[in-house]
Image: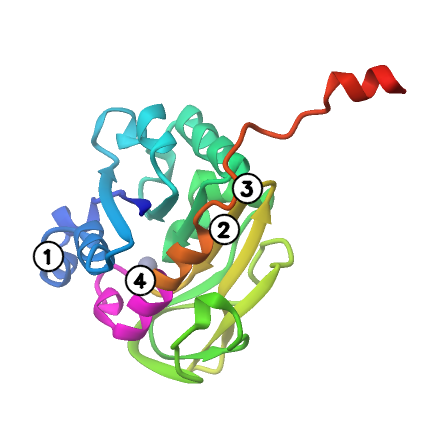
Amino acid sequence: MIKVTVWNEFIHERIDAEAREVYPDGIHSVIKKFLEANEDITVRTATLDEPECGLTEEVLENTDVLIWWGHMKHGDVSDEIAERVQNEVLKGMGLIALHSGHHSKPFKRLMGTSCNLTWREKDRERIWCCKPGHPIAEGVPESFVLENEEMYSEPFGVPNPDDTVFIGWYAGGEVFRSGCTFTRENGRIFYFQPGHETFGSFYNENIRKIITNAVRWAAPVLRTEKLVCPHSLTALI
Ligand code: ZN
């Protein structure tokens, strides 16, 4: 079984009527529901208002893949928790950063760059699959349309991805590397752009397929302590 924790800031859906209408029980609940329909995936959720943001050492040690949705309260996640997440990714935990998670503390730490991008509130987006042979693209069509999404565009201030699996193209003409993979030590990371809180992208079958594929791809191959230089080798030299 792949153990997934879906972390959501869970603010917009409580204070904004438009977001609440789309995700009445929170974005995390919708993601949990479609993921746990798979027999090989088990899901728990965690939110910002829980002690230690719901991300205690015990929770993270029992998480194979952490999914992250945050937007307006990135700063309320303590540096200690962000470092804890970063360290677990280096050991081998998978991380899927969704939408505005590009500016979350754990993702920025793991990238080491600004992760800035350009944005506009609303546009029609066509998502193109650039790597149809990649495990995250399995069963996903050549392209598909999201009638309403927040427009994120280049330049995207991340290091060069290992793979750009999807590119988003907007009616306004902009483009964006909307699905990118990264590796940090043992950990696999996937950034995926769709998922604004007032649009229903997490109900879209293709988006669900991509996130499900990403969970399976990001699950640890090796989960171990951070790599260290062994003393025995130093002794040999
Ligand atoms: Zn947004």
Q: Mark 2 or mark 3, which is nearer the start of the sequence? A: 3
Ligand 1 near label 4 (Cβ, under 8 Å)? yes
**Which numbered disc, 3 or 1, marks the residue that appears first in the sequence?**
1
Q: Is residue 141 magenta?
A: no
> What is the number of the mark on residue 195?
4
Q: Which residue is mark 2?
A: 189
Q: Earlier in the sequence, mark 1 or mark 2?
A: 1
In the rendered image, the vertical position of residue 144 relative to residue 89, given as above or below: below
Say which of 173 and 225 sits in front.
225
Residue at left offset 26%, top offset 31%: 54
Residue 162 position in % (x across, y down): 62, 59
**Mark 4, residues whose alpha carbon is within 10 Å: few (<14), some, or many (≥20)?**
many
Disc 1 target residue: 17
**Residue under the point 16% across and 58% down:** 19
Q: Is residue 33 visible?
A: yes
Looking at the image, residue 207 lies above or below residue 145: above
Amino acid type, mark 1: Ala
Callout 1–callout 2 Cβ contact below 8 Å: no
Marks 3 & 2, CB-CB < 8 Å contact = yes
Q: Is residue 84 left or right of residue 204?
A: right
At 38% across and 55% down in the image, what residue appears?
A: 215
Task: Ligand 1: give its quadrant.
Answer: bottom left
Kindly state the secondary structure of the residue where label 4 is placed: loop
Give me the disc on residue 110: 3
Q: Give amino acid for label 4.
A: Gly
Disc with the residue nearer the chain's start (1 vs 4):
1
Magenta span: 195-211
